[in-house]
Structures are given as structure tokens and as C-alpha cells.
Image (spheres, rainbow, N blue to C red):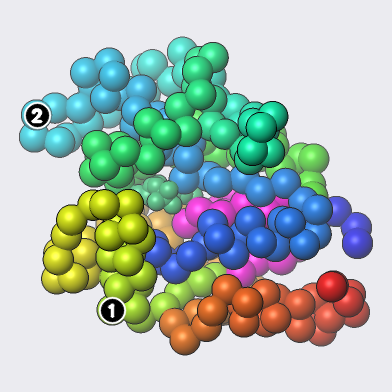
């Protein structure tokens, strides 16, 4: 199959990264997680005291410090998994912390941060043969992506899935709290001034509320067959 860009966008907790990784593996493409870059910038801002006690980021200070942030993805030689590096350090675990999760939304709203992340993503996209997930990949970062998929599921189902993930990690929360968080994240993602979460008009909708990962892969294989006549194993 010729190398193309596949953009996967959608609501939080819809399983975008699981789906995107599975597609990348079937096609032997590179998986790139755009959210990891917003998380890395947020980690930098936290490490350098650029987020106030009230949780409000110092937008100008963060914007001014962007030239000092160098980001990359590198394959871990042992696990073979892509890891996020910032300024010479593997920050994969740190960017997944609750602290970063709590502050990433307002940081990702800063216009200069979005421009900075977009430049990186587009550079990596030049190579094609990538599956990238996020919120604005098909609508803003790669509007010419050959395949765009927009994922969604009812908020109640996403909250239940998220709660299961958290419980598995030993994190405690009630279903009501998690649901409120899912709804709040939807509001922030869709209400953002610059590059909000929207379904690109040419994106294919995947509502996976009642689908397992295996069923989603079957759906994808059918889509490839229909769109390009390609049969995937
Ligand atoms: O997908 P995630 O939870 O790792 O994303 C982290 C944050 O970054 C989340 O607040 C949404 C934001 N984000 C974004 O604004 N645009 C993207 N393309 C990817 C993520």
C-alpha cells in the first residue's frame, strides 16, 4: 500500500491511541501521539514554575520558552515502543502523571504552543506512512490527510472505560467524578478558540460505543477494502 497519512481524531477516552497503534501495526506504519507533545510542553511549564497556584498557565512565559524545548519520539530498544523525549530525557512516564493531565488542557489552548506543536507534527508527517492521533489532526494539522477517522462514543460509556483503566492502575475515583471529567474535557476540547475538536467534513465517523477493539479492526479492514480495494490480514 502506498504510504499515506492517517489522521485519527475524536473525543477523549474513545480509545484513539489503542486503535491508532493497532492500525499502524497492521500497515507497518509509524504511530505518532500528538497529545504527548502537549503533555511534554505542560511538563516543562510545571518544572519551570510557569503554572500559577490557581492552575492558570503564564502564557507569555511559556511562549517565550518554546525555542528551548526540543521534542522527539524514540523507539525503546527493549520494548520496541515509541517513547517521548524532551531535551535529552525520556519523559514518557512523567507526561502521563495526574499532575500533567490536570494542567494540559489550558496549556494546549495557548496559540503559540499549538503553532509550535504543529510545526513538529508536520515535519514528522512529511515522511508519510504515519498514523497520528489527536484532536485537530484531520481538521487543522493535516487537512490533506488521505484518510481521516473521527472517533466518538457516548460519554457514559467513555466514563466507564476510563474508570476501569484508573481502577486497574490503582487510582481511586467515583463514576460520577470520572463522568464529570469526561464532560469537562469535551467542553474544553470543543470550545477551544484555536483548532477546536471538530469532525472534518471528509472524516469517516467511528462510533465505537458498542464495539470491541477487534470489531473496530474489522471495521477498519472493511473500510480499506471499500476505499482502496486493499485486503488486510
Ligand atoms: O490525548 P491526550 O489526553 O494525551 O491529550 C492531551 C491534551 O492535549 C488534551 O487536553 C487535548 C490536547 N490535545 C490537543 O489539543 N490537540 C491534539 N492534537 C492532541 C491533544
Pick whichever, 79 or 22, lies toward us. Answer: 79
Q: Secondary structure at mark 2?
A: loop
Q: Is residue 101 visible?
A: yes
Q: Which mark is residue 53?
A: 2
- Asked whether disc 2 touches disc 1, contact meaning CB atoms under 8 Å apart, the reply is no
Displayed quadrant of residue 91? top left
**In the picture, which quadrant includes the C terminus?**
bottom right
Q: Residues within 10 Å of mark 2 (few under 14, many from 20)?
A: few
Instruction: Examine the structure image and report whether residue 98 is included in the region drawn in magenta.
Output: no
Q: Can you identify the residue that label 1 sits on?
A: 156
Is residue 54 rendered to the left or right of residue 123?
Answer: left
Is residue 178 rendered to the left or right of residue 17?
Answer: left
Is residue 37 rendered to the left or right of residue 225?
Answer: left
Identified at 8% across, 34% down, the residue is 54
Q: Measured from the top left, where is residue 190 in percent x and y?
A: 35, 62
Identified at 54% across, 70% down, the residue is 150
Q: Is residue 112 visible?
A: no
Q: Which mark is residue 167?
A: none
Identified at 88% across, 77% down, the residue is 231
Instruction: Examine the structure image and report whether residue 142 is included in the region drawn in magenta.
Output: yes
Amino acid at each position: 500500500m502506498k504510504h499515506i497519512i492517517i489522521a485519527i481524531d475524536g473525543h477523549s477516552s474513545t480509545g484513539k491511541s489503542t486503535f491508532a497503534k493497532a492500525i499502524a501495526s497492521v500497515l507497518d506504519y509509524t504511530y505518532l501521539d500528538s497529545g504527548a507533545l502537549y503533555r511534554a510542553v505542560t511538563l516543562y511549564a510545571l518544572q519551570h514554575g510557569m503554572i500559577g497556584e490557581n492552575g492558570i498557565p503564564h502564557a507569555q512565559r511559556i511562549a517565550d520558552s518554546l525555542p528551548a524545548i526540543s521534542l522527539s519520539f524514540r523507539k525503546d530498544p527493549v520494548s520496541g515502543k515509541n517513547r517521548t523525549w524532551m531535551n535529552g530525557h525520556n519523559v514518557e512516564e512523567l507526561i502521563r502523571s495526574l499532575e500533567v493531565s490536570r494542567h494540559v488542557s489550558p496549556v494546549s489552548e495557548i496559540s503559540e504552543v499549538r503553532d509550535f506543536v504543529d510545526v513538529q507534527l508536520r515535519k514528522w508527517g512529511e515522511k508519510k506512512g504515519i498514523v497520528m492521533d489527536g484532536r485537530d489532526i484531520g481538521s487543522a494539522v493535516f487537512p490533506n490527510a488521505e484518510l481521516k477517522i473521527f472517533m466518538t462514543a457516548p460519554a457514559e460509556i467513555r466514563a466507564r472505560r476510563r474508570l476501569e483503566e484508573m481502577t486497574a492502575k490503582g487510582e481511586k475515583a467515583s463514576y460520577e467524578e470520572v463522568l464529570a471529567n469526561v464532560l469537562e474535557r469535551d467542553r474544553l476540547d470543543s470550545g477551544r478558540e484555536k483548532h477546536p475538536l471538530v469532525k472534518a467534513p471528509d472524516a469517516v465517523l467511528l462510533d465505537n460505543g458498542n464495539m470491541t477493539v477487534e470489531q473496530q479492526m474489522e471495521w477498519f479492514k472493511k473500510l480499506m477494502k471499500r476505499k482502496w480495494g486493499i485486503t488486510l490480514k
